[in-house]
Amino acid sequence: MPNIIFTLSAGAVGEVNDALAYHFGYQPNITAQTGTDAEGNPVYGQVPNPETKAAFAKRMVIQHFLKDKVLSYRRAMKLAEVSNVEPDIT
């Protein structure tokens, strides 16, 4: 499968990850079940997010910039295709 590669300077990577994390709401800790109480009910607490900030940033680029834009393009092309059809009115 072909790849799209973005090249960032070492100094920019952290800032780009931070910016995407801020913009899309990355949480370094998430709420998850941490055990059960004496009656067997789930107990929830904060745990480290298993998705790293870098992985989150990559996922946001794929979802919000690549996939969404391709879908938007496809919709626009489909609309243009339909809009260019001359109606058969006599």
Image (cartoon, rainbow, N blue to C red):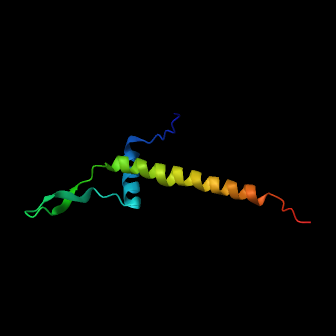
**Residue placed farthest to the front in the image?**
39
For the residue pair 51 and 12, the one nearer the viewer reads as 51
54 left or right, relative to 79 = left
The image quarter in which residue 75 lies: bottom right
79 left or right, relative to 15 = right
The image quarter in which residue 47 lies: bottom left
**Residue placed farthest to the left in the image?**
38
Q: Residue at x 42, y 41 (%)?
A: 9
Q: Residue at x 48, y 41 (%)?
A: 6
Q: Residue at x 37, y 59 (%)?
A: 22
8 left or right, relative to 71 = left
Q: How many marks?
A: 0
88 left or right, relative to 72 = right
Q: Is residue 80 placed above or below 3 in the rendered structure?
A: below
Q: Is residue 62 placed above or below 79 in the rendered structure?
A: above
For the residue pair 25 and 40, the one nearer the viewer reads as 40
Instruction: Estimate the x, y position of residue 82 in percent, counting from the top left.
Output: 74, 58
Q: Residue at x 92, y 66 (%)?
A: 90
For the residue pair 7 and 35, the one nearer the viewer reads as 35
Q: Is residue 55 placed above or below 85 in the rendered structure?
A: above
Instruction: Estimate the x, y position of residue 77 in percent, counting from the top left.
Output: 68, 54
Instruction: Estimate the x, y position of residue 88 in percent, counting from the top left.
Output: 86, 62
**Residue placed farthest to the right in the image?**
90
